[in-house]
Image (cartoon, grey):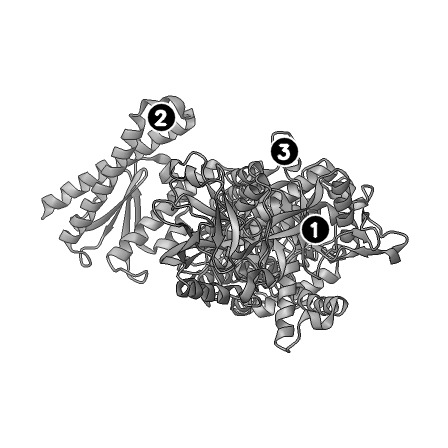
C-alpha cells in the first residue's frame, strides 16, 4: 500500500479547514462574473438583511440555499452574479437606535433630525460590518464589488424616479384616512406590519341618555357597549340599522356622550349588524376605519382624541395628558362612580400590535401618502397568466400571492420617521403649493420638504432592478442580468416583499423581477416552537459554526427540509452532519494517501475495469443525474439523500473496502486502475458536494494530484452515458446481497469474523455462478469462509442457518452455534415477510387500472418483483419444512 504523506490529519477539524479560505476566495475574485458573453447569465439578488442586528438561523438557511444555487451554476459554466446588500429597515433600525439612546437618557428630539440620522448611520456601519463577517463565516460566494444598500445614492435615485412617476400617473396621492398608528414609534404602519394577538379586555356597557323626553322600552337612555371607553370623546353619532324595527322611533333623536355632555345624533346605516350586541354602535370616525366610512356617508365631524404618542389630547377633557391605558381605567372608574356604567363583561378579543415595537396599534385619523393599488395589482396578476410569469416553488404559494393581490387595499407609504428615504415632495412656505419632483425646487429657500419618509418596503420592492443600475436602462448589469433568475425567501414575506417586487417590476421594467421564487419555511426549535427572545430558544448560527463548522451547518440547512416547510433545529442533527463530513474526510484521506503523485482523475479503458469499478461508476452516474435533477427542482433534501447514500454506502462502505484487496496486492497494473477510478470518483463527488460544503471539499480537492487551483470554478459533473452499465450494477448487487446475507447470518448466530464458518451457495443460475466465482477474492475478504461451495445442489447439514437471495440460497452450517428452535422461529418470520410482499405485488398486478395505465416497464418490473418474492418464499418454506422434520 502506498500511503503517501498528505496534509490531512486523522480527524476532521472544521476550524483548521475553514481558516482563511474565504478571504482567499474573495481576494482572488472567485465570485466575480466570468465576463464570458457566450455564457448564459444567471443572477440572484440577496434578500437584503436589516441592519438591525446580527444574522439569525433563518438568514443562514436562506443564504445557504442561494449560495448552493449560485455555486452550482458557476461550476456549470453560467456567467453568474450574486448581488449582496442590506436594507436600512426604517422603523426597526430607528427603534433600535432610539432604544440605545434611551439607555443614555437621550431622545431623538434632544438631538434633532440631522444628528439623530448620524447616529443611525453609525449603527448601520457597525452592524453592516458584523453581517459581512457572518456572510464570510457561512462561505457565501457574493460579489462584494456590487454590494448595495437601500439608502445608497443609486437606489435613492431609483426611489425618487418611482415615486415621481407614480405620482404623475395619479397612482400616488395624499389624503386623510384612518391608518394603523404605532404610538411608540410615532409612525403609520401598513396593514401587513400589524400582528394580531388575543388580549383579555372587556365590554363596557354605558348609558347614553336622550337629550329630551324620549324613551326606549321605558328607559331614558340607550345602552352602548364598547371595548375602548377612552375613544368616547371622539363619538359623533350612534348608529342603528335602518331595517331594525326596534329602533325606528329613535332615528333622528339625539343623545349625550357621558362625561363630556356633548350632544350627538342617532343615525341609520346598513353597516350596523342587527343581531350583534345591542344592535346600536357608537360612531367614532377618527378612531375606527369602519366608523370613518360611516362618517363620510353622513358628513360627520372627525374628532381625534389622542396625541401621536398615545396620550389623550385636549378633546378628552379632564383626561388630557393621560396615557391611553391609564385613561381607560380612570374613565371606567368615573363612569361607574357617576352612574353611567351598566355592567362590565370580560371579553377576549384580537388586538393589532406593531410588528416592530410590540405595542398595541391605534386606528388613527391621519394625513398620509398612499399608492393606489388596484391598477398595479391587476397588471401583476395579468403577468402571471403570460409567458413572463414568476414560477413559485412550491406552486401552492402562488395562491397566497394571488389572494392578497385580488383583495388588496391602497398602500400607506409614508412613515413619520427620520431614518429612510425622505419623500420627494415640497410645500411652498407662502402659498402651500405642493411640488413633487426628483430634484428639489430651484428656489429652495421658499420651499419646505415633506418630513415623512417612505415605507422601507417601497425601496426594497425595487431591489431586483435598482441593484442592477436602473433607472439607467443602458446600465451593463441591467442589460445583462435582469430579469434575475431565482429569488429565495421565506413564506412569511410573500406579500410584504415578493408581491411588491412583482408589481413594481412589471410597472417600471415591463418584465418579471425573477424567473423563480423558492419559498422556504421557518427555523423552529426541537419542540416545533418559533425561535424568539421571549422563549429564550434562539440559536446563533455563529455559535453553531464555532462548534461544528460552516459545512456541517450548511449540510443540515440544505438537506433538512422540503421546500415551503419549516425545519426543526437540533444538535442531534448537527452531530449527524458533522459525522457525515468526518466520514467524507476519512474516506478521502484514505483515497488520497493511496494515490501516486502522478495519478490523474482519468478513467482507464472500459475493458480494463473490474466489476466493482463498473458498478461504482454506474452508481456515480446515477447520483450525478439525481442530484442535478433535484437541484433544478430546488429539492435539496432529495439531492442530499442521494449524495449521502452514494458517499456513505456505495463509495465508502463498499467500493473503498473492495479496493484494499487490490492496493495491498502485487498487481501494479490493477493498482493503477483502481487508483484512477478512486481519483475520478472522489474528484466528481467533491464537485457534486462543493455547492453545499464549499470549505471541506476545497480543502480535500487541493490535496489531490490534479491541475486547477479551486473547486469554485471547476466544472460541475454531468451524466456520462458511457458509464451506465446496468449489467454491472445488477451483477454487483448480487455480490452485495450474498455478502450481506452471510454477514446477517454471522450476526444472528453471534459468529464474529474471526470465527471460521463454511459457506454453501446453492444456485442453478449460471450467471450468478459466474459472478460469484469471478469475484471470489471479494467474497473471501468480506465473508471470510473456511470453505466456499458454489453448486446447483449442495448437501445441507441438519443444523444450518439460511438466507435466501434472488437466484440463490445461502447455507452456513453452525451446529455448535445455533439453536434449532430459534432458527425455525427466524425462518417463520421470513415466511411471513415474503408472503406479505407476494400479496402486495399480486394486489397491485390484479388492479386493472394499474396494469392498463402504468408504463409497460413499470408493470414488467412489478412482475419481476413478484416472481422473485415467490421464489424466495418457496425456498424458505422448503427449508422450514426440512428443519421441522429434523426436530
Give percent across and percent down for residue 358: 53, 62
Q: CA gap, disc 2 to disc 1?
A: 54 Å
Q: CA gap, disc 3 to disc 1?
A: 21 Å
- Whether residue 647 can be seen here: no
Give percent across and percent down for residue 245: 39, 35
Above or below residue 351? Residue 100 is below
In the foreground, 178 or 545: 178
Above or below residue 166? Residue 577 is below
Give percent across and percent down for residue 408: 58, 40
Above or below residue 707? Residue 864 is above
The residue wearing badge 3 is 378
3 and 2 marks in contact (CB < 8 Å)? no
In the foreground, 183 or 5: 183
The outermost residue toward the front is 213
| Residue 548 disc label | none
Which of the two discs, 2 and 1, labels the residue nearer the N terminus? 1
Q: Residue at x 65, y 69 (%)?
A: 97
- Camera-near label (2 vs 1) is 1
The residue wearing badge 2 is 850
- Whether residue 153 can be seen here: yes
Which of the two discs, 3 and 1, labels the residue nearer the N terminus? 3
The residue wearing badge 1 is 459
Count of numbered labels shown in the rendering: 3
Amino acid at each position: 500500500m502506498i500511503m503517501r504523506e498528505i496534509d490531512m490529519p486523522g480527524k476532521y477539524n472544521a476550524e483548521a479547514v475553514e481558516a482563511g479560505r474565504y478571504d482567499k476566495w474573495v481576494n482572488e475574485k472567485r465570485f466575480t462574473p466570468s465576463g464570458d458573453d457566450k455564457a448564459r447569465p444567471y443572477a440572484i439578488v440577496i434578500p437584503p438583511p436589516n441592519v438591525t442586528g446580527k444574522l439569525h438561523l433563518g438568514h443562514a438557511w436562506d443564504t445557504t440555499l442561494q449560495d448552493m444555487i449560485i455555486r452550482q451554476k458557476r461550476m456549470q459554466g453560467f456567467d453568474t452574479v450574486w448581488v449582496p446588500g442590506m436594507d436600512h429597515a426604517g422603523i426597526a433600525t430607528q427603534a433600535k437606535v432610539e432604544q440605545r439612546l434611551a439607555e443614555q437618557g437621550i431622545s431623538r428630539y434632544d438631538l434633532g433630525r440631522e444628528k439623530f440620522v448620524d447616529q443611525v448611520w453609525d449603527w448601520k456601519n457597525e452592524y453592516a460590518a458584523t453581517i459581512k463577517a457572518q456572510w464570510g463565516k457561512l462561505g457565501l460566494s457574493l460579489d462584494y464589488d456590487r454590494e448595495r444598500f437601500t439608502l445608497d445614492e443609486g437606489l435613492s435615485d431609483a426611489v425618487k424616479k418611482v415615486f415621481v412617476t407614480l405620482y404623475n400617473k395619479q397612482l400616488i396621492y395624499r389624503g386623510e384616512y384612518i391608518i394603523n398608528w404605532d404610538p411608540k414609534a410615532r409612525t403609520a404602519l401598513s396593514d401587513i406590519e400589524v400582528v394580531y394577538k388575543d388580549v383579555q379586555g372587556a365590554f363596557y356597557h354605558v348609558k347614553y341618555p336622550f337629550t329630551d323626553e324620549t324613551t326606549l322600552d321605558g328607559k331614558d337612555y340607550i345602552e352602548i357597549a364598547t371595548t375602548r371607553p377612552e375613544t368616547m370623546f371622539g363619538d359623533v353619532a350612534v348608529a342603528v340599522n335602518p331595517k331594525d324595527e326596534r329602533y325606528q322611533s329613535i332615528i333622528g333623536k339625539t343623545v349625550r356622550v357621558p362625561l363630556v355632555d356633548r350632544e350627538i345624533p342617532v343615525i341609520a346605516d346598513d353597516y350596523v349588524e342587527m343581531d350583534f350586541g345591542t344592535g346600536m354602535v357608537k360612531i367614532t370616525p377618527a378612531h375606527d376605519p369602519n366608523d370613518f366610512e360611516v362618517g363620510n356617508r353622513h358628513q360627520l365631524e372627525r374628532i381625534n382624541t389622542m396625541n401621536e404618542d398615545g396620550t389623550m389630547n385636549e378633546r378628552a377633557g379632564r383626561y388630557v395628558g393621560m396615557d391611553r391605558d391609564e385613561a381607560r381605567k380612570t374613565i371606567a372608574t368615573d363612569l361607574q362612580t357617576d352612574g353611567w356604567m351598566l355592567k362590565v363583561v370580560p371579553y377576549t378579543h384580537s388586538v393589532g400590535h406593531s410588528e416592530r415595537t410590540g405595542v398595541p396599534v391605534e386606528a388613527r385619523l391621519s394625513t398620509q401618502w398612499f399608492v393606489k393599488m388596484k391598477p398595479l395589482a391587476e397588471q401583476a396578476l395579468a403577468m402571471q397568466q403570460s409567458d413572463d410569469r414568476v414560477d413559485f416553488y412550491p406552486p401552492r404559494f402562488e395562491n397566497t400571492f394571488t389572494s392578497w393581490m385580488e383583495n388588496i387595499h391602497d398602500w400607506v407609504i409614508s412613515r413619520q420617521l427620520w431614518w429612510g428615504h425622505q419623500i420627494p415632495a415640497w410645500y411652498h412656505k407662502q402659498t402651500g403649493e405642493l411640488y413633487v419632483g426628483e430634484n428639489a425646487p430651484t428656489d429652495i429657500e421658499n420651499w419646505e420638504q415633506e418630513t415623512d419618509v417612505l415605507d422601507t418596503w417601497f425601496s426594497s420592492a425595487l431591489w431586483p432592478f435598482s441593484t442592477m443600475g436602473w433607472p439607467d436602462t443602458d446600465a451593463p448589469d441591467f442589460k445583462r442580468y435582469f430579469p434575475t433568475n431565482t429569488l429565495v425567501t421565506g413564506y412569511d414575506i410573500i406579500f410584504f416583499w415578493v408581491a411588491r417586487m412583482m408589481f413594481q417590476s412589471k410597472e417600471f421594467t415591463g418584465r418579471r423581477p425573477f424567473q423563480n421564487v423558492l419559498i422556504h419555511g421557518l427555523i423552529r426549535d426541537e419542540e416545533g416552537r418559533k425561535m424568539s427572545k421571549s422563549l429564550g430558544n434562539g440559536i446563533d448560527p455563529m455559535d453553531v459554526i464555532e462548534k461544528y463548522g460552516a459545512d456541517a451547518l450548511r449540510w443540515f440547512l440544505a438537506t433538512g427540509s422540503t421546500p415551503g416547510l419549516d425545519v426543526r433545529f437540533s444538535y442531534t442533527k448537527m452531530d449527524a452532519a458533522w459525522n457525515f463530513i468526518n466520514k467524507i474526510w476519512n474516506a478521502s484521506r484514505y483515497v488520497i494517501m493511496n494515490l501516486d503523485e502522478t495519478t490523474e482523475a482519468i478513467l482507464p479503458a472500459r475493458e480494463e475495469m473490474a466489476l466493482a469499478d463498473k458498478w461504482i461508476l454506474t452508481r456515480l452516474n446515477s447520483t450525478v443525474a439525481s442530484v442535478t435533477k433535484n437541484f433544478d427542482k430546488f429539492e435539496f433534501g432529495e439531492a442530499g439523500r442521494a449524495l449521502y447514500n452514494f458517499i456513505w454506502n456505495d463509495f465508502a462502505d463498499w467500493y473503498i473496502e473492495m479496493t484494499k484487496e487490490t492496493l495491498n496486492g502485487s498487481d501494479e497494473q490493477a493498482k493503477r486502475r483502481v487508483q484512477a477510478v478512486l481519483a475520478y470518483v472522489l474528484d466528481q463527488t467533491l464537485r457534486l458536494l462543493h455547492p453545499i460544503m464549499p470549505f471541506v471539499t476545497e480543502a480535500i480537492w487541493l490535496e489531490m494530484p490534479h491541475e486547477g487551483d479551486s473547486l469554485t470554478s471547476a466544472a460541475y459533473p454531468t451524466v456520462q452515458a458511457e458509464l451506465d452499465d446496468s449489467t454491472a450494477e445488477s451483477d454487483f448487487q448480487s455480490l452485495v446481497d450474498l455478502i450481506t446475507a452471510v454477514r446477517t447470518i454471522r450476526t444472528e448466530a453471534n459468529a464474529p469474523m474471526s470465527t471460521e464458518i463454511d459457506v454453501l451457495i446453492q444456485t442453478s443460475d449460471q450467471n450468478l455462478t459466474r459472478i460469484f466465482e469471478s469475484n471470489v477474492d471479494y467474497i473471501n475478504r468480506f465473508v471470510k469462509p473456511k470453505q466456499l461451495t458454489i453448486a446447483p445442489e449442495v448437501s445441507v447439514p441438519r443444523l444450518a442457518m439460511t438466507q435466501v437471495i434472488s437466484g440463490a440460497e445461502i447455507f452456513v452450517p453452525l451446529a455448535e452455534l445455533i439453536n434449532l428452535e430459534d432458527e425455525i422461529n427466524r425462518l417463520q418470520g421470513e415466511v411471513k415477510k415474503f408472503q406479505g410482499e407476494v400479496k402486495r405485488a399480486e394486489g397491485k398486478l390484479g388492479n386493472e387500472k394499474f396494469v392498463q395505465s402504468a408504463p409497460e416497464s413499470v408493470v414488467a418490473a412489478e412482475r419481476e418483483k413478484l416472481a422473485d418474492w415467490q421464489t424466495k418464499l418457496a425456498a424458505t418454506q422448503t427449508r422450514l419444512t426440512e428443519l421441522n422434520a429434523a426436530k
